[in-house]
Image: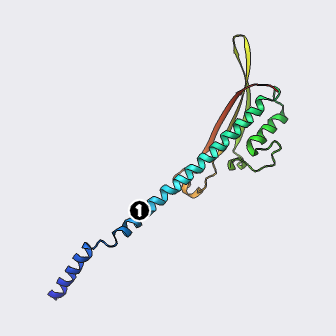
Amino acid sequence: MFNLLNRSRSRARAALGCRRAVAAVEFALFTPLLFLVMVGLFEFGYYLNQSIDLDKSLRVGVMLAARSALPLSADVETTIGNLVKTGTTDGTGDFIVPGWSNASASLTITTTTYSADDTDYEVIRVVASVPYEPMFATFLEGYGLATLNMNAAHEQAYVGN
């Protein structure tokens, strides 16, 4: 019996002293954290891509508005909305930002008059609020970030035709 106990004890010491599988164990413990960081980075990059696309489309829309006759007619505002949302003036293209398909997305076009040195200046402002459509929706929901909105605005002085 005493011999069996000594053998078990020596095997336990040998197992504790063995370092052959340490790297595999560390990798197994580190992999979930690495996965979360990578998914977060991909999601952040996708968010940045969508927000840059939204910003560019607003810039194009406000430039069209700045070259249109004031006051902006309903047809011109529809054309600007189509250009901002789809990149086409007739609205037949795909949405530039996937969130435009959501009913809570909004686009506002306003014109304001500013005065300086007895001269009036017209400034057109295009404002958008678009829900972010995530790449990994369940990942964001797990962290309470299911409803992110991208907000952007651009202003341009009236240029005329």
Q: Is residue 150 left or right of residue 3?
A: right
Give the x, y percent position of residue 62: 73, 33
Residue 158 vertical position relative to residue 102 in the rendered view, above or below: above
**Measuring 67% from the left and 42% from the top, which residue is drawn there?**
54
Asked where in the image residue 3 lies, by quadrant, the reply is: bottom left
Judging depth in this view, the residue of 67 and 153 nearest the camera is 67
Please report the residue visible at 23 percent of the width from the left and 80 percent of the height from the top.
Answer: 11
Q: Residue at x 74, y 36 (%)?
A: 61
Q: Along the line of sight, which residue is nearer the eye, 133 or 28?
A: 28
| Residue type at numbered disc 1 | Phe
Colour mapping: rainbow
User: 12 left or right of 43?
Assistant: left
Q: Quadrant of residue 13?
A: bottom left
**Quadrant occupied by the N terminus:** bottom left
Depth order, front residue of 104/75: 75
Tell me if residue 58 comes above or below residue 102 in the rendering: above
State the residue at coordinates (23%, 77%). Answer: 14
- In this view, 43 is above or below 2: above
Residue 157: percent from the left, percent from the top?
72, 25
Q: Quadrant of the C terminus?
A: top right
Q: Position of residue 81 (x, y in %)?
A: 77, 39
Outermost residue on the top side: it is 118
| Residue 88 location (% of width, % of height) | 79, 44
Query: 2 or 161: nearer the eye?
Result: 161
Task: Tell me, yes or no, if residue 147 can be seen here.
Answer: no
Q: Residue tagged by mark 1? A: 30
